[in-house]
Amino acid sequence: MLEKESFKLVVEAIEQLEMGFQGLPEFNSSFELDNLRNVLLEVATRMQDNFPYPHPLYVGQMLKPPHPIARLAYTLSLWINPNNHALDGGRASTIMEKEAVNEIAQMFGWKIHLGHLCGGGTMANLEALWVAGKVKPGLKIVASQQSHYTHERICSVLGIPFVAVKSDRQGRMNLDALKTLLAAGDIGTVVVTMGTTATGSVDPLPEILELQSQYNFRIHADAAYGGYFTLANNLDTKTRAAFDCLKAVDSIVIDPHKHGLQPYGCGCVIFQDPKVGSFYKHECPFTYFTSDELHLGEISLECSRPGASAVALWATQRLLPYTKEGQFATELSKSRKAALTLFEKIQGDDRFLIAFPPELDIVVWTPRATSASAASEIAKKIFASSAQKNLHLAIANLPVEFFINIGAEMKLDQDYLTCLRSCLMKPEHFDWVDDIWQLLQHATDQV
C-alpha cells in the first residue's frame, strides 16, 4: 500500500545537497545505527494503529496523502532544518516560500499581494480575521452556520463579536439572512466559505460582492478546502462563477496540506492589499539584521516556522504547475468526477436519500427510514459495517432541511440526520468508485 520506490532518490539528493558545503572541517554526528533502527521500527509498529489513509478505500475525512515529491523534498530539507521566520535561518527556503505563495496568488488572479505560509488553515484564518479586525475595528464578523467552527473560536480569541448566518438548503450562506444582518450597519467582515467541511458547499460569492458595494464590508474567503478547485474544468455554472470572483475579495486562505498534496502543516494566507503588512510591524533586536529584504517573520504572527513546508510546496509546484490544462488540475477534476459518479449511484438506490449534488468532491447521504432517529442509527451501523469491509467512510450530523421533502416519508423526531459522508479527494478515487460502491452495497445489505 505504501509507495517506497521514490525514497531511493533521497540518498542521491543528500549527496547533491552536501556538495554545497564543501571546504568545511569534517565532523560526524554521534549515534549508534542499531539503536536508531530499533527505535525506528518501534515507531513503525506503533504507527500501524491508524486507518489506511493513503488507500483509495479510505474516503472518510479530508486526508489526502502528500505527493512523493513533497515527501522527498520535505525529508531532504530536514538535513538543513531551515527556519523561515528570518532570512538568516532559512535563506533558500524563504525565497522558495515567496515563489510558492506567489504562484498560489496568481492562481486566484492576484499579481500584487502580501502573504505567507503558516502552520495550517486555523492559523491562516486567525491572521486574516486579525487583520479584518484592524481594518474594521469594533465591527462584527459573520460566517455561515456551515462554516468551519474555528471562525467563531478565533473571533472569541481576538475579542471580535461573531454572528453565524443561517444556511440555505444546500449548505450555503442564506442571502436573505445576510441582508437582514447587514441592514443593522455593524458588520465589518463577511467570511465566504469556498467549500464547507461537511458538504463541500460554496457560498454565493457573486451575490455577496454585490452586497459589498452597498454595505461596505470586507470579504474574507475561507478556501482552505476548496480553493484549488478554481483550476477544475468540471464545476457547475454557479460554483464556477463563485470561484471566478475570488480575485475581488480582500483576503484568501488555502490549505496546501489538503488538495495541494502537502504534508501537515502547511496553510497559506494572502491579502490583496499589501499595505495591511503595516499591522504586523514590530522590532526585533536579534533577528532582522542580515538583510534589507523583507523577512517573512515581519509579515507573520508566527515566529519559528518550518522551512521544510516551503521546500516541499515549491518542489510540488515545480513538478505540477497550477495550470488549468496541467496534471494537477486534471487530477483535481477527476476527484469531482468521482464524486458525481458516486452521487449518481447513490441517487439511483431507493434505500438512500441524498441531500444535493456535490459542488466539489464531497458526497453526503442517509438511509431511508421511518424516522430521522431511525435513519441516523442505520447510518451509524452502515458506517461500522463498511469499516469491517475496509471501506472507511465518515459520518456527519446535518440539518433535516438539507433533505428536501423528507417530511413526506420520514417522521422528523429530531432536527438533524446522522449522514454518511465521503471525501473523494485522491486522484485514484475515480478508478475505485465501482469498488467503493460494491462495498457500500454489501455493508448496507448486511445492516
Image (spheres, helix red, strand yellow):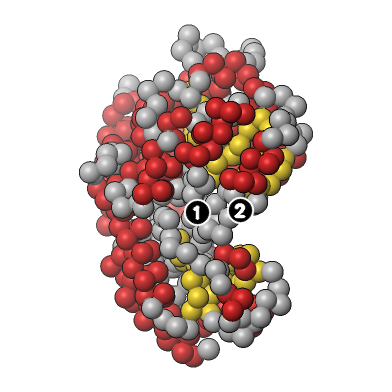
Name the residue rendered at 66%, 69% in the picture: 416
Name the residue beneath numbered marker 2: 167
For the residues labelled 2 and 1, say whether their Cβ atoms are less than 8 Å apart. yes
Q: Quadrant of residue 127?
A: top right
Q: Position of residue 66 (x, y in %)?
A: 39, 51
Q: Is residue 310 visible?
A: no
Marking on residue 21: none
Depicted 57 relative to depicted 260: above or below: below
Q: Nearer the viewer, residue 282 or 196?
A: 196
Q: Quarter of the image holding residue 13?
A: top left
Q: Is residue 285 visible?
A: yes
Circle nearer the viewer, 2 or 1: 2
In this view, 371 is above or below 189: below
Q: Residues within 10 Å of mark 2 (few under 14, many from 20)?
A: many
Q: Is residue 9 above or below residue 361?
A: above
Residue beneath the point at 41% across and 74% down: 347
Find the distance from the CA under tag 2 to the CA under tag 1: 10 Å
Q: Residue at x 62, y 68 (%)?
A: 400
Looking at the picture, which amino acid does disc 2 mark?
Ser
The residue to which callout 1 is attached is: 201
